[in-house]
Amino acid sequence: MTLLFLLLATYAAGVSQPKVLLFYGMEGISGVTKHREVMIGNKEYHRGRMLLTADVNAAVAGLKAGGAGTIMVADAHRSGNPAADILLDRLDPPRDVS
């Protein structure tokens, strides 16, 4: 998965938990082997969304374990889906999704 971690706040005096903006895309996520799994309109797309959600959950867990504060999650894939590519009902809280 193409993940870009952009620190919105750094470890500065008095800032112990930085805010993190996590952009996700579906290219290169764990388990995806076919282009059809990352493009809306294909029966395999749901499987890709499940794999994406698992990878984002793993990234968020790692960020939290590493001391991150607020984690915002944003879709950078744009498969053509008017909704988010990620499965919001399977996304582990806490999160702020756009």
Image: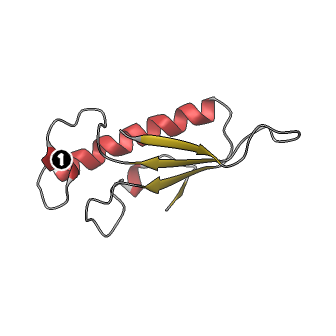
- For label 1, the SS is helix
Residue 26, given in percent of the width and then of the height, sits at 31, 46
Query: Extreme right residue here?
Result: 13
Residue depicted at x 25% and y 65%: 80
Q: Which residue is mark 1?
A: 37
Residue 87, given in percent of the width and then of the height, sits at 35, 54
Circle 1: residue type: Glu
Q: Is residue 20 left or right of residue 9?
A: left
Q: Is residue 27 left or right of residue 17?
A: left
Of 3 and 60, nearer the camera is: 3
Q: Is residue 68 above or below residue 39?
A: above
Query: Extreme bottom residue here?
Result: 82
Residue depicted at x 36% and y 48%: 25
Of 73 and 11, nearer the camera is: 11
Of 54 and 22, nearer the camera is: 22
Residue 60, given in percent of the width and then of the height, sits at 52, 39
Residue depicted at x 24% and y 32%: 31
Q: Is residue 4 above or below residue 62?
A: below
Q: Is residue 19 left or right of residue 57?
A: right
Residue 53, given in percent of the width and then of the height, sits at 37, 45
Of 10 and 64, nearer the camera is: 10
